Amino acid sequence: MLDHLKANNRAWAARMLSRDPDFFARLERQQTPEYLWIGCSDSRVPATQIVDLDPGQIFVHRNVANLAPPQDANYLSVLQFAVDVLKVKHIIVVGHYGCGGVSAAVDGKRRGLVDHWLHPIREVRHEHVHELDAIADATARLDRLCELNVIRQVRNVASDIIVQSAWADAQSLAVHGWIYSLANGFVTDLGVTVSGPQDIARLG
Ligand code: CO
């Protein structure tokens, strides 16, 4: 079963060792990533590959539509471990254009549990309904909602008590919002970086 994946794994491990004989031994001792990635579960947006880093360099949390809901125990556990224990320097919320989760949030169809998960995106749309309704092209309108969703999640992360406490303790930590294009593989920085409590007001 899944023999091709097991063969891939052995070949990959051998390749990593040939490049760096100490690679696995070093990672086994300790992980010291500088980045926490909060991204979409979409198979086309794999964190480490997009920014061409190796295992051990990014702490990753992914869910449908890259949400950071303030009551989600899974996300909060990842955030706390990343900030308090790993002491990452950067948290990057990474959305992507053409996100199926964002689309499903606003297409009016009933799907079940996921409708509840996606509820925060409908709130984002509601908050920006005038700007969004002014965009005639449906794809462009959805892409803008993908961006607005990232900005909202940056605000959620930056206003969380875990991040606020880190700043109060003078820990170096910045929260960034990026969007990824499936069409060309490029990430774009949305320019909403928050490096301390003073920056949050800018996010609106
Ligand atoms: Co997505």
Image (cartoon, rainbow, N blue to C red):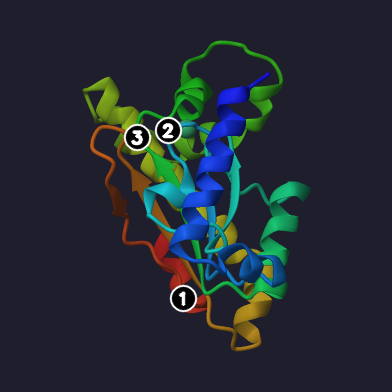
Which of the 4 image quarters holds residue 111?
top right
Residue 146, percent across and down?
Answer: 40, 38
Q: Which residue is mark 1?
A: 195
Q: Earlier in the sequence, mark 3 or mark 1?
A: 3
Secondary element under disc 2, as helix, strand or loop, is loop
Q: Residue 57, percent across and down?
A: 52, 64
Q: Which element is circle 3 on? A: loop
Q: Is residue 64 above or below residue 105?
A: below
Mark 3 residue crowding within 10 angstroms, few (<14) / some (14–19) / many (20+):
some
**Residue type at numbered disc 3:** Tyr
Which residue is the site of mark 3? 97
The answer to whether residue 54 is seen in the rendering is no
Dot 2 crowding, Cα within 10 Å, few <14, some 14–19, many 20+: few
Residue hosting label 2: 44
Q: Nearer the viewer, mark 3 or mark 1?
A: 3
The residue that appears at 63% across and 74% down in the rendered structure is 164
Please name the amino acid that badge 2 sits on.
Arg
C-alpha distance separating marks 2 and 1 = 29 Å
- Quadrant location of residue 103? top left
Q: Earlier in the sequence, mark 2 or mark 3?
A: 2
Q: Position of residue 203 (x, y in %)?
A: 42, 60
Occupied quadrant, residue 63: top right
User: Identity of the amino acid at label 1?
Assistant: Ser
Q: Are marks 2 and 3 in contact (CB under 8 Å)?
A: no
Extreme residue toward the bottom, this view: 170
Of labels 2 and 1, earlier in sequence is 2
